[in-house]
Image (tube, rainbow, N blue to C red):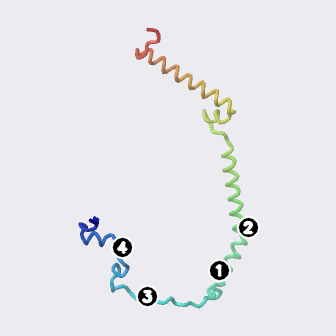
Amino acid sequence: MQDDPYVDVPDWLKQLQEPPSTEELLGDDRPAAREPIAEEPVDISQFIVEEEVEEETELRAVGGESLLDGLREQASDELAEMDRLDRQPPKGLAGIVVGLSPMQRVILSLLLFLDVTLLGCMCLVMTGRVVPFP
């Protein structure tokens, strides 16, 4: 007695188990494959226009320095300004905390924790939820 698990499985479900071939997916109306076209190398020197060369020399003549040098100087000025702004400590409470040493930050956080727990206990006693001495 041999149990075949595929006896009761319909044919359409058996076909789903096997992936369809590319011929079935594409059919016969696909276009024929084209052969690659071999192109000759193109000499780009024939496309260079003398006017473009003249424009480049005009750009270099602005103010006695090239346009790229001016852009480089402007970018370096902006970077220096950004560095100056990054070095300034933040204002307010964040500026005070950033200026503290790690030990001072730990002590400050412990004191803040004790304040919050003390205020919470006082609120519980005042509302009658907790009775300290029954």
Q: Amino acid at mark 3?
A: Ala
Q: Amino acid at mark 4?
A: Pro
Read off the residue under disc 4. Answer: 19
- Above or below, 131 relative to 55: above
Mark 1 to mark 4: distance in Å? 59 Å
Eye-nearest disc, 3 or 2: 3
In the rendering, at what x and y percent does residue 48 appear? 64, 84
**Label 3 or label 2, whichever comes before in sequence order:** 3
| Disc 3, SS | loop
**Label 3 or label 4, whichever comes before in sequence order:** 4
The residue drawn where x is 31% and y is 70% is 16
In the rendering, at what x and y percent does residue 108 appear? 62, 27
- Above or below, 5 relative to 53: above
Say if mark 4 contacts mark 2, CB within 8 Å: no
Eye-nearest disc, 3 or 4: 4
**Label 1 or label 2, whichever comes before in sequence order:** 1
